[in-house]
Image (cartoon, rainbow, N blue to C red):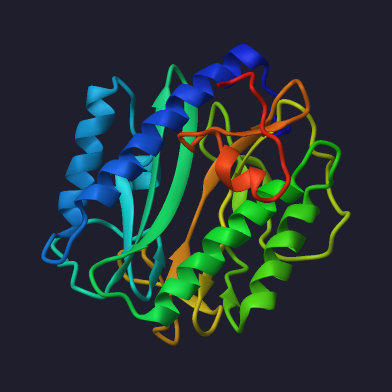
Amino acid sequence: MAIQIKNIEQLKLMRRAGLVVAEIHQLIRDAVKPGMTTSALDAISEAHIKRSKATSNFKGYHGFPATICVSVNEEIVHGIPGSRIINDGDIVSIDCGAIVDGWHGDAAFTIGVGTVNPEDQKLMDVCEASMWRGIAAGKHGAKLSDIGYAIEQYINSQGKYGILQEYGGHGIGTEMHQEPHVLNFGRAGQGPEIVAGLALAIEPMITRGSARTKVLKDDWTVVSTDSSRGAHFEHSYVICPDGKPFVLTAIDGGQSDLEHLGIEISSLLM
């Protein structure tokens, strides 16, 4: 499938979908606490999607049974919400998406619940910061692999972490997963040029130990083989017609985090 390039009207629809996702993230951040089940978080997400007159792009995707992925501790991605109780000190990864008028939004974050181990907090901080550095590197005129290079270099500068290699980011638009696949590692200067209208979901996934993973018997949940805890952050962003980036799934369009890295965001989708 060819890489999909969007015009400004299509990007405005993607922004609407992205805001639904951003609102779900905030609702979950506010709600999550020890003693909750992972399915309770899914119910919060499903209710907001319905209120927003959007559609879940996760539920039913290749048979996935829920509105969001909830992955706890050694579960890194694609955890199925259910009866699991979230405990004090757990780290919980939330991945969710929404569709508005046929256009998709997709984003993820990891949060510590209650009293968090400082090493777990650093894991989350490093993963999130690497995502922002990847987005900053994916500027107009850059090459696709510049994103993964920036992510890998930052993570490796912060300590010894396992960077998942079999999972990565992706193009997004009229489908949740489109070309191109975006690695979270590799050499700079490779692959297609990043141009106006290209929307990408950037999503590093790292562990405190080995990068090796396995899929559980539910055929979805990805866990670290050494039971080390993992973190996952994701945002969908686009290069606007003015050549500047805009983060579709961030409430402020990514302004605060990208400004910190010397990147000015587009005003076209504000």
Q: How many marks?
A: 0
- Say which residue appears at 81% left-offset and 36% top-offset: 140
| Farthest bottom residue in view | 226
Q: Is residue 75 left or right of residue 260?
A: left
Q: Is residue 18 left or right of residue 202?
A: left
| x, y percent for residue 112 | 32, 67
- Say which residue appears at 76% left-offset and 27% top-offset: 196
- Say which residue appears at 30% left-offset and 64% top-offset: 218
Quadrant in which the N terminus is drawn = top right
Q: Measured along the vertical axis of the image, is residue 158 above or below residue 179?
A: below
Which one is nearer the viewer's eye here, 208 or 181? 208
Quadrant in which the C terminus is drawn = top right
Q: Measured along the vertical axis of the image, is residue 184 above or below residue 28?
A: below
Q: Is residue 203 left or right of residue 79?
A: right
| x, y percent for residue 241 | 74, 20
Q: Measured along the vertical axis of the image, is residue 165 above or below residue 67?
A: below
| x, y percent for residue 168 | 60, 57
- Say which residue appears at 39% left-offset and 84% top-offset: 227
Name the quadrant containing residue 62.
Answer: top left
Q: In this view of the protein, can residue 185 be seen by the observer?
A: yes
Name the quadrant containing residue 121.
Answer: bottom left
Q: Is residue 182 left or right of residue 64?
A: right
| x, y percent for residue 229 | 41, 77
Which one is nearer the viewer's eye here, 115 or 217? 115
Which one is nearer the viewer's eye here, 250 or 204? 250
